[in-house]
Image: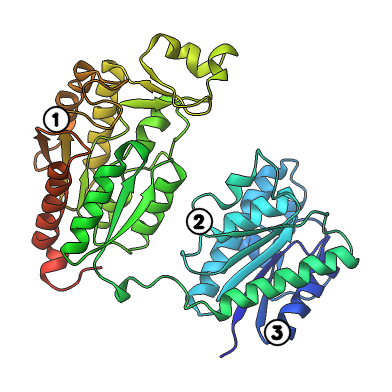
């Protein structure tokens, strides 16, 4: 069966290059759908979906966009319109994969569109700006976008640009030919998302072992911010039956300005979809604020929060963890309550009283039980009735706490309406 590849191209300036990529894809037996995301002069080749149609989908018109002085606003409108048109193609079965090429502007616009497609749909960006430090992580974010670094500007056709376009065509055709499309949760209705990081690894491993014994498949996510965003995306896609959120600290890092900040909507996807979740407190006991050179360079975070006066863990010059204060921990508790109050399914917060990570147990660098103690009162004061808070007399990285997490989650799953009527995911 022939695959259909969506091509996003700025056909006001890149028509020759787009035609070459289109030909390379079609030579391999795939169909193409060409979407014009350019907003300069009219397209210099025939399109499947014109820039005028893209602009109209965003509630605007291409003539107005072309005269905008604010290129950021123009690009945003074209992105919004292209997302709508690509989503329509996907729902019609006309998007087995997607590809684009260009520099910084086109890469930002095209990858923004790609992020709207589910995980599992092949996505390839051929970019001359792939290695730009300030932008590269933004391009793929928490989505499964493959970035091919074109070391030359793809402007005009020559031996090098042809080579990159040919290889890009081969890449997207190869991926779609081996892809079964978006990840289908119906293939395994017993998936559980689990967050972890270095200082909670023992707990996470014990949770995953116990889930396996109980017939579930645990999918771990590295809680360094982007990994948590990826989990939220996949939870929103409906892949999981439950969540063991051992390290929800992307939320606190975002609040306090730490290195592992997640998106502002952290801790919302499971509740919004009605998926049971157990939330622990690992990572709320620290702020990631390395490298240590920030201390000596007048760094804004270090000055604002007086990081240099705190308990610190410095395993090397790149990694620095600073202890959170009681006031910060209380603020985190209030924010967690606000997030979990929106949940449409069972949720439980489990607090390991004897230490939230390997860094905050007795004798460790960030041990501060008085600061930890500020969390539960602030959390309970803000939570609506029906959301339980369980204080467990153990440390996070213990078999007993891991067992408590698993037992509570499975209790909620078994009691949930979706599980009892066979709906699951």
Image mark for residue 28? 3
**Mark toward the viewer: 3 or 1:** 3
Q: Residue 398 appears at what percent x and percent y?
A: 18, 40
Identify the secondary structure beneath mark 1: helix
Q: Quadrant of residue 249?
A: top left
Q: Does 144 sit left or right of 386 as displayed?
A: right
Q: Residue at x 56, y 69 (%)?
A: 122
The reply to whether residue 78 is visible in this rendering is: no
Looking at the picture, does residue 197 appear above or below residue 102? Answer: above
Identify the secondary structure beneath mark 3: loop
Q: Residue 149 appears at what percent x and percent y?
A: 72, 56
Q: Does 280 sit left or right of 248 as displayed?
A: left
- Quadrant where the N terminus sits is bottom right
Q: Earlier in the sequence, mark 2 or mark 1?
A: 2
Q: Quadrant of residue 22?
A: bottom right
Name the residue tied to disc 1: 380
- Local crowd at mark 1 within 10 Å, few (<14), some, or many (≥20)? some
Looking at the picture, does residue 370 appear above or below residue 58? Answer: above
Q: Residue 27 appears at what percent x and percent y?
A: 74, 85
**Mark toward the viewer: 2 or 1:** 2
Q: Residue furthest top?
A: 309
Q: Does 266 sit left or right of 33 as displayed?
A: left
Q: Residue at x 18, y 56 (%)?
A: 210
Instruction: Kindly check if marks 2 and 1 are in contact, taking CB atoms under 8 A apart as contact.
Output: no
The foreground one among 368 and 33 is 368
Q: Earlier in the sequence, mark 3 or mark 1?
A: 3
Q: Residue 378 appears at what percent x and percent y?
A: 19, 24
Image mark for residue 143? 2
Q: Residue furthest bottom?
A: 1
- Quadrant where the C terminus sits is bottom left
Q: Residue at x 35, y 15 (%)?
A: 311
**Mark 3 and mark 1: Cα distance apart in space:** 60 Å
């Amino acid at each position: 069966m022939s695959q259909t590849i969506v091509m996003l191209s700025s056909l006001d300036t890149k028509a020759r290059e787009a035609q070459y990529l289109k030909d390379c894809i079609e030579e391999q037996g795939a169909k193409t759908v060409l979407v014009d995301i350019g907003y300069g002069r009219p397209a210099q080749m025939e399109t499947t979906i014109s820039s005028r149609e893209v602009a109209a989908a965003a509630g605007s018109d291409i003539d107005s966009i072309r005269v905008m002085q604010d290129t950021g606003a123009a690009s945003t409108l074209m992105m919004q319109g292209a997302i709508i048109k690509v989503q329509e193609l996907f729902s019609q079965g006309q998007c087995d994969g997607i590809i684009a090429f260009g520099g910084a502007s086109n890469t930002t616009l095209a990858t923004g569109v790609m992020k709207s497609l589910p995980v599992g749909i092949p996505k390839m960006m051929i970019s001359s700006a792939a290695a730009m430090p300030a932008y590269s992580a933004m391009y793929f974010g928490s989505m499964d976008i493959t970035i091919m670094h074109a070391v030359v500007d793809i402007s005009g056709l020559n031996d090098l640009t042809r080579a990159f376009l040919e290889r890009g065509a081969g890449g997207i055709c190869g991926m779609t030919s081996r892809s079964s499309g978006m990840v289908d949760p119906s293939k395994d209705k017993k998936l559980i998302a689990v967050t972890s990081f270095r200082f909670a690894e023992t707990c996470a491993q014990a949770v995953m072992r116990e889930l396996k014994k109980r017939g579930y498949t645990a999918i771990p996510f590295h809680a360094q911010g982007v990994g948590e965003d990826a989990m939220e995306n996949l939870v929103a896609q409906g892949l999981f039956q439950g969540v063991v959120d051992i390290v929800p600290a992307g939320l606190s890092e975002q609040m306090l300005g730490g290195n592992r900040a997640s998106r502002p909507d952290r801790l919302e996807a499971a509740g919004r979809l009605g998926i049971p979740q157990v939330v622990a407190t690992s990572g709320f006991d620290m702020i990631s604020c390395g490298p240590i050179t920030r201390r000596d360079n007048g760094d804004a975070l270090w000055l604002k929060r007086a990081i240099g006066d705190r308990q610190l863990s410095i395993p090397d010059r790149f990694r620095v963890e600073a202890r959170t204060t009681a006031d910060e921990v209380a603020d985190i508790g209030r924010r967690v309550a606000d997030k979990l109050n929106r949940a449409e399914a069972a949720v439980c917060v489990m607090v390991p009283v004897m230490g939230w990570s390997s860094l905050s147990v007795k004798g460790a660098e960030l041990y501060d039980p008085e600061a930890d103690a500020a969390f539960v009162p602030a959390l309970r004061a803000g939570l609506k009735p029906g959301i339980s808070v369980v204080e467990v007399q153990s440390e996070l990285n213990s078999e007993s706490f891991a067992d408590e997490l698993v037992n509570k989650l499975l209790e909620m799953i078994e009691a949930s309406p979706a599980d009892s009527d066979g709906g699951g995911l």
